[in-house]
């Protein structure tokens, strides 16, 4: 591997540029290629984002100098694109969900293992330093035995009936929306922090807007309210805006999560409260530099982001010494630092510190069982 690792980014809607910015903050990594659905769009976006080469997907795969490919396209493209990247002998970082079908994700896990290539899923929210601090504190016994888990992931970018995005189209997003898109992060963090496994789910979905106004012009926006009425077509929606899920864990404890993309004022708020036999942890991603620690016999406390107060494992995720705020963009940088260390070694480590395709498969299985539970209105085992 040359000193500089060379990367390509496939798809430059919302999250692709976020991957680009994160990679530009990592030494000896260069994004040399941008991929879009057409050469024309790739050229246009590469110029705007300052990336030297623009390709269609197939052409990019032919470029031997590209070591790593980031897949930032709509969900239905993840499987075919990740498969082609692995078959081309390149390392791959794929946005969540890993695929829209369990058997596709299983195929990717097997192929990645066969090739020995580095494979990761962008569960970047694990990389808030406080999330790893909670995990490490639990591992070291500070939380005690897990009694219960509560969580929510709330947004409002699909609040209006005129808010529209490819995630609303099952053929592009899969048969779940809020659960697959943001519930996957919350479920991943729930198991990552507690070290528990979810064994059963009981889900109840609601679709607040039974129809939405789809802009007739292909515009990349989360809100169509800037167009005239005649610019829309009214389309039926059958995926969930909101989901409530009861959880059972393998230690016998219980939990619940709520996921919604129609909670006005909640811009991107992941919240977990994990009650243990020694203390209670509460984290809110809109205040990512604080961890509330609840006690019974002594005063409650708020751990502030200061690596000097952290275990080494979570201090390693702090980019700036002391209390300088770090947030969402920093999580991808910290994750990619760990993934690219493996790329520099040349293969997937036995126990990867970052979320792998196997974790992506795990979340897809849980997500599909949640969809099944909602349909049956019954408990479903994982
Ligand atoms: C939209 O819901 C979105 O961009 C998700 O796709 C990301 O995974 C999440 O981290 C932020 O919101």
Image (tube, grey):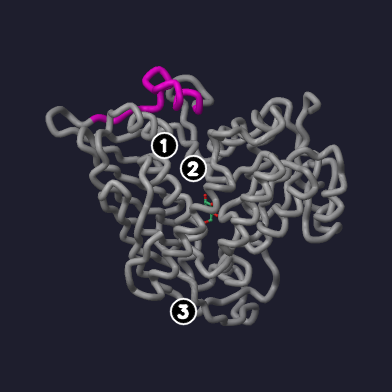
Q: With respect to residue 326, does 78 lie above or below?
A: below
Query: What residue would you read off at disc 1?
Result: 131
Q: Which mark is residue 125?
A: 2
Q: Position of residue 4 (x, y in %)?
A: 78, 27
CB contact under 8 Å: marks 1 and 2: yes
In the rendering, at what x and y percent does residue 54 appear?
84, 49
Residue count near mark 1 (Cα–Cα under 10 Å), binned few <14, some 14–19, many ≥20:
many
* Residue at mark 2 to residue at mark 3: CA–CA distance: 30 Å
- Ligand 1 is within 8 Å of the C-beta of the residue at disc 2: yes
Task: Compare residues 290 and 368 and report the one nearer the observer.
Answer: 368
- Nearest-to-viewer mark from 3 and 1: 1
Q: Is residue 225 visible?
A: no
- Which residue is identified by label 3? 210
Q: How many marks?
A: 3
Q: Quadrant of the C terminus?
A: bottom left
Q: Which residues are magenta?
A: 301-317
């Amino acid at each position: 591997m040359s000193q500089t690792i060379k990367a390509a980014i496939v798809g430059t809607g919302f999250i692709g540029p976020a991957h680009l910015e994160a990679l530009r903050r990592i030494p000896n990594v260069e994004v040399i290629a941008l991929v879009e659905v057409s050469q024309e769009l790739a050229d246009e976006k590469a110029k705007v984002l300052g990336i030297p080469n623009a390709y269609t997907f197939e052409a990019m795969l032919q470029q031997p100098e590209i070591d790593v490919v980031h897949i930032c396209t709509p969900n239905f493209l993840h499987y075919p694109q990740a498969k082609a990247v692995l078959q081309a002998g390149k390392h791959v970082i794929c946005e969540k969900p890993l695929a829209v079908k369990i058997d596709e994700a299983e195929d990717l896990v097997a192929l990645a293992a066969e090739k020995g290539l580095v494979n990761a899923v962008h569960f970047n929210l694990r990389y808030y330093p406080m999330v790893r601090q909670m995990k490490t504190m639990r591992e070291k016994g500070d939380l005690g035995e897990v009694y219960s888990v509560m969580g929510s992931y709330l947004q409002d970018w699909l609040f209006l009936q005129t808010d529209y995005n490819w995630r609303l189209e099952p053929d592009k997003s899969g048969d779940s929306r809020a659960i697959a898109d943001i519930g996957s992060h919350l479920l991943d963090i729930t198991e990552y922090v507690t070290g528990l496994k979810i064994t059963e789910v009981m889900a109840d979905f609601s679709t607040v807007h039974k129809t939405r106004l789809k802009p007739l012009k292909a515009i990349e926006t989360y809100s169509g309210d800037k167009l005239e009425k005649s610019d829309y077509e009214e389309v039926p929606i059958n995926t969930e805006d909101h989901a409530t899920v009861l959880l059972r864990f393998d230690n016998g404890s219980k939990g619940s999560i709520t996921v919604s993309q129609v909670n006005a004022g909640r811009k991107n708020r992941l919240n977990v409260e994990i009650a243990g036999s020694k203390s209670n942890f509460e984290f809110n991603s809109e205040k990512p530099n604080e961890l509330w620690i609840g006690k019974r016999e002594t005063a409650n406390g708020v751990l502030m982001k200061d690596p000097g107060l952290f275990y080494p494992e979570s201090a390693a995720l702090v980019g700036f010494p002391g209390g300088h705020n770090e947030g969402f963009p920093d999580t991808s940088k910290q994750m990619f630092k760990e993934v690219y260390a493996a790329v520099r070694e040349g293969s997937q480590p036995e126990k990867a510190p970052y979320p792998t395709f196997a974790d992506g498969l795990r979340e897809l299985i849980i997500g599909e069982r949640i969809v099944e539970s909602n349909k049956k209105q019954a408990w479903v085992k994982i």
